[in-house]
Each structure stands twice: as C-alpha cells, then as structure tokens.
Amino acid sequence: MGSLALDIETASPFEGKPFNGDDTDTLAWVAIAVAYDDGSGSEPDAEVFFRDGGWEDKHTADLLNRFITWCEGRDIERTLTYNGSGFDLRHMANWADDLAEASVRPNAYTRYFPTDVSTGAEASL
C-alpha cells in the first residue's frame, strides 16, 4: 500500500467571472504534480502534467485522463495534499462531475473521487 501526493495549479481566465477561489466555475485547471511512494524505500515516482490546449472542457478532461492513467495500477492507500479537501480534491471532483454532466467524460466523479470530498472530510482516491 502506498501514498499519493498531489498538488494542482489553477488560473482564472474567464472574462466576466470575478475570481473566487471557492467557486470552481471561476477557475481552470492548469497543472497537477503527483508523486507515489509504494513504501518500499525506493525513490518515489513523480510527474507533472500540464494542460495541453485552451480552456474548453475537452482539455480539462485530457488532464484528468492523464492523471487517472498515471494512478491506475498503483495501490494507493492514502492521498497527501496541502488543504486537499478544501481546494485540490474538491475542485478536481467538481471538474470531474461537470465533465460527466456535460457527457465529456462519463462517470469520472463516481469512479475516481470519494463522495466525502464535498463535505470537507479527508479522503483518498
């Protein structure tokens, strides 16, 4: 069983929407840094994924897909973040839910994000 560490970076590129760090609709996901430690004492695997393209949903879905693909096959017992339930995981879950609602990436939220992210409780992927 291992640990996943993650941190996201965001921007507020939408005209007419004043920045509000608590409102996912005012943010765009720009990058995610991830690291996985399997507990064996070997060097952790680490990667940074950057958004590839504009602010359309398909580019958010691509970033989510690359993150999910990177996580698959890793035995993640816990997720480590700084304010993850209050920011990173909450916004990632909201984007995943929005993508599913827009039929851009079905089932992303229910498959990859725990239901307690919205409550602020610490959660693992």
Image (cartoon, rainbow, N blue to C red):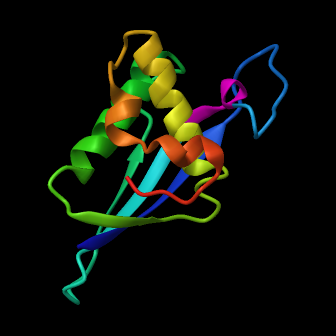
Residue 42 appears left or right of 23: left
Residue at position x 33%, y 44% from top?
67
Vertical position of residue 117 compared to residue 111: above or below: below
Residue placed most toward the observer, 47 or 74: 74
Q: Residue furthest top?
A: 102
Percent of width and height locating residue 95 = 52, 29
Residue at position x 60%, y 53% from top?
85
Percent of width and height locating residue 51 = 44, 35
Q: Residue furthest bottom?
A: 41
Range drawn in magenta: 24-29
Vertical position of residue 73 compared to residue 66: above or below: below
Residue 77 appears left or right of 9: left
The quarter of the displayed image where residue 96 is located: top left
Number of numbered discs present? Answer: 0
Residue placed most toward the observer, 1 or 104: 1
Percent of width and height locating residue 6 = 46, 59
Residue 47 appears left or right of 19: left
Q: Is residue 34 magenta?
A: no
Residue placed most toward the observer, 45 or 115: 115
Percent of width and height locating residue 46 = 32, 65
Vertical position of residue 83 compared to residue 118: above or below: below
The quarter of the displayed image where residue 16 is located: top right
Vertical position of residue 62 compared to residue 89: above or below: above
Q: Residue furthest left?
A: 73
Residue at position x 65%, y 60% from top?
83
Which quadrant is the N terminus positioned in? Answer: bottom left
